[in-house]
Amino acid sequence: MRSLRSILASISASQTRSNDAKLFDPSPAGTTMRDVFIWLAARSDSIVARCARATFSSVMMASRAPGLSAAIRHATCYPAASHVVDPHGLVTGLADAFVRDGGRIEMAAVTGCAAVDGAVTALSTARGPVPVDAVVLAAGLASGRLGRAFGLNLPLVAERGYHVMLDAPAARFEVPVTWSEYGFVLTPMESAGIRLAGTVELGSATAPPSWARAELLIKNAARLFPGLAGSETSRWMGMRPTLPDYLPAIGPAPRHRNVFVACGHQHIGLTSATVTARIVRDLIAGVQPALDILPFAADRFG
Ligand SMILES: Cc1cc2nc3c(=O)[nH]c(=O)nc-3n(C[C@H](O)[C@H](O)[C@H](O)COP(=O)(O)OP(=O)(O)OC[C@H]3O[C@@H](n4cnc5c(N)ncnc54)[C@H](O)[C@@H]3O)c2cc1C
């Protein structure tokens, strides 16, 4: 299996950029997010510490994120971070690379499975049965319903989030900017637009979107960047698949020896996809994964 880095190198367009900056505003109660990070830095040599060493002053912020409100006093930069500037290009590029490497993609809704002697032999789909050697249950929120076919209890809920694309030619910042207190991110995208994304709505998967949340994203973005003028070009609502303990489910399904679970990655499914993929690859190959996967056990909810 090729590494993600080599696959990315072979995808023609550049879908990622580095040197992200994530900004925090001062908290009204006196303790600032900066204080929190410095406190954490003093107690940890983890990534949090590295972030804290890159705390920005307002002068530095002005060069990285021109137009930022003068009310913002501190920023924390994640120097080693990257972000995706064309998610669709990334996904289609990965799919093309998979096919070039000999993979085959079949689009069909899975409805159940057939099993013999503790191993799944075929998936039932809307297009008829598909024979399988191994199965990875990675259907996002639908993994809860599908998991029942494999005897799994995966109590996934939808953390609904909103997204607005703005055509904002005047926006000149080049790094994603997070306003943590308001739970959203502004990301400059490849297609000359700004993507506003965030908020958490715990709601039914089938309820209609609450578009007021998308409108709030636009309003808060204008508070952070007062000169941000732009017209909305698209909006959508997505459902982050989340388990009650906020950990993903990664590992073997107890009742079928060739079924593996990879779901429940809540807010960081894109970021953590490669780590999960490596674990699942190892499990299918019968190799011990490099990480202890016990906390992610797929049968921990019974
Ligand atoms: C507004 C917003 C912003 C986000 N920002 C980030 C971010 O910046 N970074 C980050 O890492 N994550 C982010 N996320 C979270 C990320 O989108 C999710 O964690 C991720 O999509 C989960 O991936 P998944 O493959 O488990 O599920 P999904 O992406 O939901 O994919 C599940 C797939 O399974 C398919 N499927 C469902 N049912 C069936 C069936 N019966 N048969 C066959 N196929 C089926 C679906 O069609 C879909 O293709 C964001 C989410 C939202 C909503």
Image (spheres, rainbow, N blue to C red):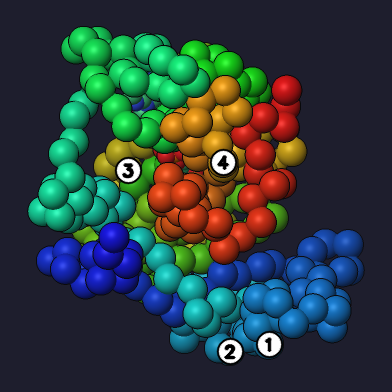
CB under 8 Å between callouts 3 and 4? no
SS at mark 3?
strand
- Residue named by callout 1: 53
Q: Residues within 10 Å of mark 3 (few under 14, many from 20)?
A: some
Q: CA distance from mark 2 to mark 3?
A: 30 Å
Residue 27 in view in this figure: yes
Earlier-in-chain disc, 2 versus 4: 2
- Residue named by callout 4: 251
CB under 8 Å between callouts 1 and 4? no
Earlier-in-chain disc, 1 versus 4: 1
CB under 8 Å between callouts 3 and 1? no
* Front tag of 2 and 4: 4
Q: CA distance from mark 2 to mark 4?
A: 47 Å
- Residue named by callout 2: 59
Q: Answer with left or right where residue 122 lies relative to residue 75.
A: left
Q: What residue lies at 71% left-to-right and 46% top-to-bottom?
A: 295
Q: Is residue 279 above or below residue 144?
A: below
Q: CA distance from mark 3 to mark 1?
A: 36 Å
Q: Answer with left or right where residue 97 lies relative to residue 134.
A: left
SS at mark 4?
strand
* Front tag of 3 and 4: 4
Q: What residue lies at 46% left-to-right and 17% top-to-bottom?
A: 117
Q: Type of residue at label 4?
A: Gly
- At which x and y percent is residue 156? 61, 26
Earlier-in-chain disc, 1 versus 2: 1
Q: Type of residue at label 2?
A: Val
| Closer to the camera in the image, 17 or 100 | 100
Q: CA distance from mark 1 to mark 2?
A: 16 Å
Q: What residue lies at 81% left-to-right and 74% top-to-bottom?
A: 40
